[in-house]
Amino acid sequence: VKADAYGHGAVNVARTALDAGATWLGVATVPEGIELRQAGLQAPILVMGALHHIEEIRALARWQLQPTIVTPKQALVFTEALTDVCVPLPVHLKLDTGMSRLGFDWRQALEFLEFVDGLPALQVFSMYSHFATADDANETEMRRQYNRFERAIAALKTHNRLPGRLHLANTAATLSDADALQYDMVRVGLGIYGLIPAPHLKSVLSLKPGLEVKARITHLKQIAAGTGVSYGHQFVAQHPMTIAVVGIGYADGVPRLLSNRLSVLIGDHIALQVGAITMDQLMLDVSNIPDLKEGDVVTMICKSCHHRITADDWANCIGTISWEILCGFKHRLPRIMTGNSIRKLYPTEDRLL
């Protein structure tokens, strides 16, 4: 549920996941973990980012979060920060098997574990790594990383130093590679929200996106042929048009790169976005949609409508990934949970649903 649960609202998603059977939660930062604790969630929480500041480490311990340790030097900083702790803090060791991001060299897993486990303030709870190419149809590199992780495990087994938990699989590996599921946990991110991380995995499991993004028409106006729309007049009307102004913009998470390339739904009608998307608003050509009024709902992303529009569609249009699109939706957009119960994480404003 890091990055505000990929833009979906961390607290509500975490509650739903735990209700559905999840036993752990994962976040990237200490403040993300504290938010969940302040909401009353008691499940174990793994902080997957690397921490180095004394006060941040003490806050982590105070809120009973569990950190990722990536170097011996970092482990020593934890020891310095936790001099008053009576019970050793459970920690998770991160090995770099090929991502070249966070993690200690997998070839030195035994030395790394023995060093950390020898520190009085820390107790190794798990060891994990992260795939760099699990969403690639060519599994060569993923297999290489898996084999490295297995070799690290074998070295620990030889010396009877295997930690209590092991985990490796992200969403793509969970869908594509049974071997990666041998361990004790999986870290499913994108898949929780109903999106598949790669086209070749879509046949493995049928998922439905959990997110819809909606806004409201705030103004309707008629413009004449030759009239420019929005900043820079990137769009100029070729004929008389009806323009709808919608109360959502790039400050809310609609990428400006989608300007003049975005389609939305109003009821059963498709409308094209025109002109540059602005910070708080965007404009639509609604000339062919009858009986519109201010306050009507515009569906930007839909999960079950006849004309399906997804985060993948936005991402493909501007050359990015659906993760970035989802994480871009800001806190100005209220998150409303639907289903058996409805929870509002942010107060509803007139301009948005």
Image (tube, rainbow, N blue to C red):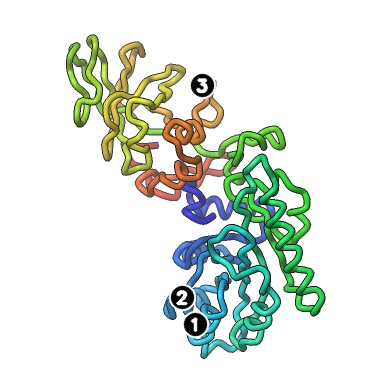
> Which of the numbered marks, if any, corresponds to residue 77?
1
Measured from the top left, where is residue 18 in percent x and y?
63, 55
Q: Tell me the mark number nearer the camera, choosing from 2 and 3.
A: 2
Gap between marks 2 and 3, in whole Å?
Answer: 48 Å
Image quadrant containing the C terminus? top left
- What's the residue at 47%, 53% (across, down)? 4
Q: Tell me the mark number nearer the camera, choosing from 1 and 3.
A: 1
- Horizontal side of 77 relative to 233 (left or right) equals right
Residue denoted by label 3:
307
- Judge whether 106 appears above or below 188 on screen: below
Gap between marks 1 and 3, in whole Å?
Answer: 53 Å
Q: Secondary structure at mark 1?
A: helix
Q: Amino acid at mark 1?
A: Val
Quick check: marks 2 and 3 in contact, CB under 8 Å? Answer: no
- Horizontal side of 264 relative to 37 (left or right) equals left
Measured from the top left, where is residue 304 in percent x and y?
56, 28
Quick check: marks 1 and 2 in contact, CB under 8 Å? Answer: yes
Image quadrant containing the N terminus? bottom right
Q: Amino acid at mark 3?
A: His
> Which of the numbered marks, if any, corresponds to residue 269?
none
Q: Nearer the viewer, residue 214 or 156?
A: 156
Q: Sequence-wise, which precedes: disc 1 or disc 3? A: 1
The image quarter in which residue 198 lies: top right
Residue denoted by label 2:
52
- Judge whether 98 appears above or below 75 on screen: above
Quick check: marks 1 and 3 in contact, CB under 8 Å? Answer: no
- Judge whether 112 appears above or below 86 on screen: above
Q: Sequence-wise, which precedes: disc 2 or disc 3? A: 2
Q: Would you call the spot at circle 1 few (<14 residues within 10 Å), some (14-19), or many (20 or more)?
A: some
